Image (cartoon, rainbow, N blue to C red):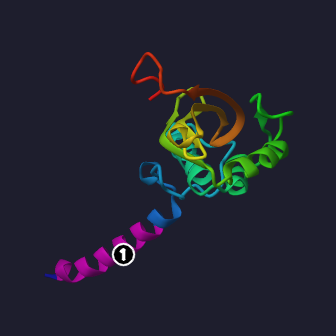
Amino acid sequence: MRYALLAPIFLSLVIAVQTSVIKAWPWPWIVGARSNRIAVCDYNAPKRGLLRKREAAIADYARIILEQRDVQAAFDKYIPGEYIQHSSFFSRSGREHSIEVLIPFYTDPGLSWSNLRTFASGDGNGVFHYKLNTNGGREKGGETYAVIDIFRFKGTCIVEHWDAVQQIFGNETNPIAFF
């Protein structure tokens, strides 16, 4: 009988502790692709759960830069320091130059994206693969491209970038080319 009186107190204590732990701890299995739980990347992220954290980071980075079109926020969150840029679309490497080039590109209202896929690997790389349409795409007189952006991570921070861009003409021999 005396234990029955303690049960509500014990249950309240357990709920209070669990609630504070859940809010304070970045549980890796609840950090989803559309989550904003990662506040800022971590160069020294522990190896335990690192692949999941990178998967969440690359998906969140894609969401911020492609869906929200907020280059500055994406860079501030995932590229806070060193950044090696290998893309031929840039005249030089580095974080600040990349931001200068990408802001007008990603905020262009004539651009749209579809078929976005994101991946991360155990060897420290992350990938976007998507279809880029300019001025409504090929069907509306614009152009359509298959784009692959490859990133290298240090912890959960992005430190290096490569890309491959290929125009889609619509007459490719393979009917499922690119996607």
Q: Where is residue 158 in the image (x, y as percent from the top left)?
A: 68, 40
Question: Mark 1 belongs to which amino acid?
Answer: Leu
18 in relation to 159, above or below: below
Number of dots carrying numbers: 1
**Considering the image in quadrants, where does the N terminus appear?**
bottom left
Of residues 155 and 4, which is closer to you in this image? 155
165 in relation to 106, above or below: above
**Which residue has dot 1 on it?**
13
Residue drawn at point x = 78 percent, y = 38 percent = 83
**Considering the image in quadrants, where does the C terminus appear?**
top left
Question: In the rendered structure, does residue 62 fall within the stretch colored magenta?
Answer: no
Badge 1 element = helix
Query: Magenta: predominant secondary structure element?
Result: helix
Question: In the rendered structure, does residue 7 fall within the stretch colored magenta?
Answer: yes
Residue drawn at point x = 54 percent, y = 41 percent = 137
Residue 167 falls left or right of residue 8: right
**Label 1 crowd bin: few (<14), some (14–19), many (20+), radius 10 Å:** few
Residue drawn at point x = 40 percent, y = 24 percent = 176
The reply to whether residue 125 is in sight is: no
Magenta span: 2-20
Q: Position of residue 174 (x, y in %)?
A: 42, 18
Q: Position of residue 120 (x, y in %)?
A: 53, 34
